[in-house]
Image: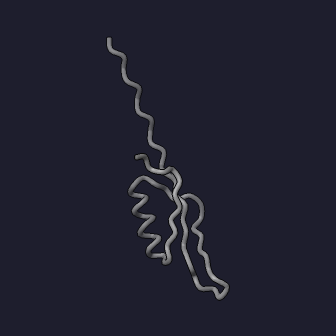
Amino acid sequence: MSKPIYIIIEKRTDTALAEEVNKKIREGYVPHGNLVICADQAGFTQSYTQALLLRAQPAAAPAKPKA
């Protein structure tokens, strides 16, 4: 099964988000866009969200024709 090209990670704490983003970077993803922090009306942080894109892999070289 292939990896999705675009993913969104949402966590309740900045530390949890950083751990998951670092894990995805090791898997070949790169952060895309800004970090989004959502807060309630009282100003308490509810979630941290980051979008990531799968880094483009170089195309495989075409097979050489047999002589």
**Eyeballing the image, is 58 above or below 35?**
above
Q: How is the image coloured?
A: one colour
Q: Residue at x 53, y 61 (%)?
A: 8
Can you name the residue that lies furthest to the top here? 67
Total number of numbered labels?
0
Residue 21, position in %: x, y? 45, 64
**Eyeballing the image, is 59 above or below 53?**
above
Can you name the residue that lies furthest to the left here? 67
Q: Quick one: 16 or 30, which is closer to the camera? A: 16
Q: Residue at x 50, y 77 (%)?
A: 12
Residue 5, position in %: x, y? 51, 50
Can you name the residue that lies furthest to the front here? 1
Answer left or right for 30 relative to 44.
left
- Quarter of the image with the C terminus in it: top left
Q: Residue at x 48, y 44 (%)?
A: 56
Q: Quadrant of residue 58?
A: top left
Can you name the residue that lies furthest to the right here? 41
Residue 51, position in %: x, y? 55, 61
Residue 36, position in %: x, y? 59, 70
